[in-house]
Image (tube, rainbow, N blue to C red):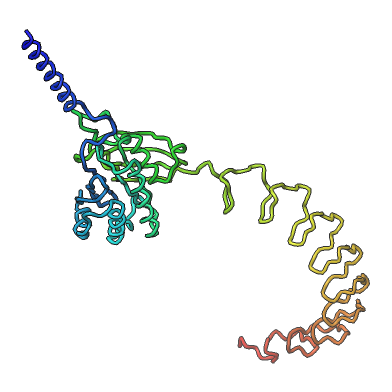
Amino acid sequence: MKMRRNLLAAVSSLAVMSAVLLTGCGAPADEGTAIRDTGFLTLSVNPEIRIEYDEEGRVIDLTGQNDDGKNIVASYPDYIGKECDDVLNDLIVKINEAGYFVEEIDGGRKNIVLQLEPGSVVPSSTFLEDVTASTQNAVKNLNLSSGIVTIDDDDYDPAYAKNGSPSPYITLEKAKEIALAHAGVNAADAVFDDREFDHDDGTAVFELEFTAGGVEYEYNVDAVHGTILQAEHDASGSGYDDTDYGPNNDGVTDYDDTDYGPNSDGVTDYNDTDYGPNNDGVTDYDDTDYGPNNDGVTDYDDTDYGPNNDGVTDYDDTDYGPNNDGVTDYDDTDYGPNNDGVTDYDDTDYGPNNDGITDYDDDDDDGDDDDDDD
């Protein structure tokens, strides 16, 4: 009997130990904990490079995820054993030297995406923040304007997790954040008109359309790596309501401001009708003395016009012309340049060769008596 009790105790202990072992092996890891002893960080500009590191954050492998990434990795053989942030700095320099930051997407800068794969081991709780700061310093030292977008465990869509494997796709909210960051638009100013998750030639893509400030934007964001595959914007329909023109406009037209000109104060004085460069703001309606030499007082009695007027008009002087003597001889009707002042009314022999005697019988224009018709 005693032997049977010992045997039962041994069997029970073994069963308990087996249950503990099975539970430990089969239980899933807590959310957010590493499921491997290495980590993977992907750097994406246009070259995509996957960085594998150990528990202490030292790089053990680099893999180009596309042709551009493979070319960069091939030019950087001495990376093994270096700290992750140092390798990131070196890669940013090489990518810049290869001219990838010169290229633009829809006229905008290329963002840098740092993507920490789900389940990766992290040397410290601030690992992603530390490598991001290191990358920002590299960008600053190269005088680049690229922004940095980070993707970590919280940015993956759990709806696509299967069979205990983490989701390979980022969330829609993260894709929107990436597009807005590239466009330089605040989330509060954007209205998303369309957003779709689709596969374009085998690539999972978020297709986004949004409007901000009257400008329409369209973005295709890689749902796995978070890179921008395509971007377009259309500003042709913007600003029709903005009629506030000029270099200092604020976008709002004040229709009540009719005080125009460079020195306007925004308030129109409708009572100021004193125009011109030297106006004093008060119009003297009694001043009708116009011209450059006016003295402000109009002499209505001065009708003596002309350059040599003396201010007094002699109405009795009707002797006009350049040689007038101021006295008109009304009896002198002998006109012309050679007049002698005495008109001979009996002289009807006109013309340049007249002799003062008109021969009425002479119908021959040459002055002789020959009849030219004979």
Q: Position of residue 241 (x, y in %)?
A: 53, 41
Rendered position, 361 above or below 247: below
Q: Is residue 368 visible?
A: yes
Rendered position, 75 above or below 225: below
Residue drawn at x 32%, y 36% is: 155
323 to the left or right of 159: right
Q: Position of residue 337 (x, y in %)?
A: 79, 85
- Depth order, front residue of 228/246: 228
Image quarter in which the C terminus is found: bottom right
Q: Position of residue 332 (x, y in %)?
A: 89, 80
Residue at the limit of the structure toward the top, as seen here? 1
- Depth order, front residue of 102/232: 102
- Depth order, front residue of 223/346: 223
Rendered position, 284 above or below 41: below
Residue drawn at x 78%, y 48% is: 271
Image quarter in which the N terminus is found: top left
In which quarter of the view is residue 329 placed?
bottom right
Q: Position of residue 94 (x, y in %)?
A: 28, 59
53 to the left or right of 243: left
Residue at the limit of the structure toward the front, as seen here? 2
Rendered position, 122 above or below 337: above
Residue drawn at x 6%, y 12% is: 3
- Depth order, front residue of 292/78: 78
Q: Is residue 345 visible?
A: no
Residue drawn at x 70%, y 90% is: 367
